[in-house]
Image: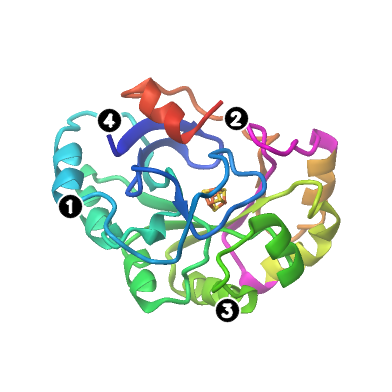
Amino acid sequence: MIVYGPVASWRLGKSLGIDLISVDKFCSFDCIYCQLGRTEHKTIERKIFVENSQVKKELDNIHEIEADVITFSGLGEPTLARNLGFSADYARKFGLPIAILTNSSLFSREDVMEDLLKIDWIVAKLDAPDKKIFEKINRPHEKIKFDEMIEGIKEVRKKAKKFSLQMMFVKENKKYAEEMADLAREIKPDDVQINTPLRKSPVPPLSKGEIFDVEEHFHGLNTINVYSSYPPKVKPIDYEEMKRRRPE
Ligand code: SF4
């Protein structure tokens, strides 16, 4: 199945996930904290992982959903799916806002921008203030350049209806919170979601105190942090499908 959840998201509410990658983990990053494990298929090639006919069939099979938002996310980077735009158009039938959790790496591509403009709420990852920390934390595909990605983020921000920055803080970047806050001020997101890996992850999370210290650097910006937000109660359609994408 490519549809999973609804999941209880501390930042999105009740979120029905659509995973256009689904078959295996495909991503342009290999983040040190990734809950899905190492990236065996590190790629920047956009392709069809799940045929449009399957997307239509699964979405047509959903008759009642209790969700606040439909979210493109799942086993890897959703902008790698070439049918993201088609699927966003088709998901409009639910009459709910459509969001995407993305790692921002392909934002400078025109075809990706075109697809993103069909989406109401873009939640874009940024975990580093510079190339060195970016490479250490996100271990990107060799063709992804940090400065180009930042320019892409700024372009998408200008055009997006709603734009959030998601920042994951771990031991490796916590001392750069001030620089990351400065970068966030340049980007001017609607809000900044300050996260640390509380779910199963190869690296330990920062403590509540550390995350509150990080958040202080973001004064003047709207922020939410993972320790001070409470996810809603949800009833997933299929618990196993949800667990595949969100191990506990
Ligand atoms: S971008 Fe997301 S899916 Fe890809 S490696 Fe990082 S955390 Fe995992």
From the top left corner, tell me how far across and down residue 195 is, in percent.
67, 44
Q: Which residue is mark 1?
A: 52
Q: Residue furthest front?
A: 40
Q: Nearer the viewer, mark 1 or mark 4?
A: 1
Q: Nearer the viewer, mark 4 or mark 3?
A: 3
Q: Quadrant of the N terminus?
A: top left
From the top left corner, tell me how far across and down residue 18 is, in percent.
33, 43
Q: Which residue is mark 2?
A: 230
Q: Earlier in the sequence, mark 3 or mark 1?
A: 1
Q: Nearer the viewer, mark 2 or mark 3?
A: 3
Please give the range of residues in magenta. Answer: 186-209
User: Identity of the amino acid at label 2?
Assistant: Tyr
Q: Which residue is mark 4?
A: 65
Rounded to the nearest angstrom, the CA distance separating label 1 from label 4 is 21 Å
Residue 182, above or below 60: below
Q: Earlier in the sequence, mark 4 or mark 3?
A: 4
Rounded to the nearest angstrom, the CA distance separating label 2 from label 3 is 35 Å
Q: Nearer the viewer, mark 1 or mark 2?
A: 1
Q: Which residue is mark 3?
A: 148
Q: Pick the residue in front: 29 or 162.
A: 29
User: Identity of the amino acid at label 1?
Assistant: Asn
Asked if disc 1 and disc 4 are in contact, CB closer than 8 Å, the reply is: no
Q: Residue at x 29, y 62 (%)?
A: 82
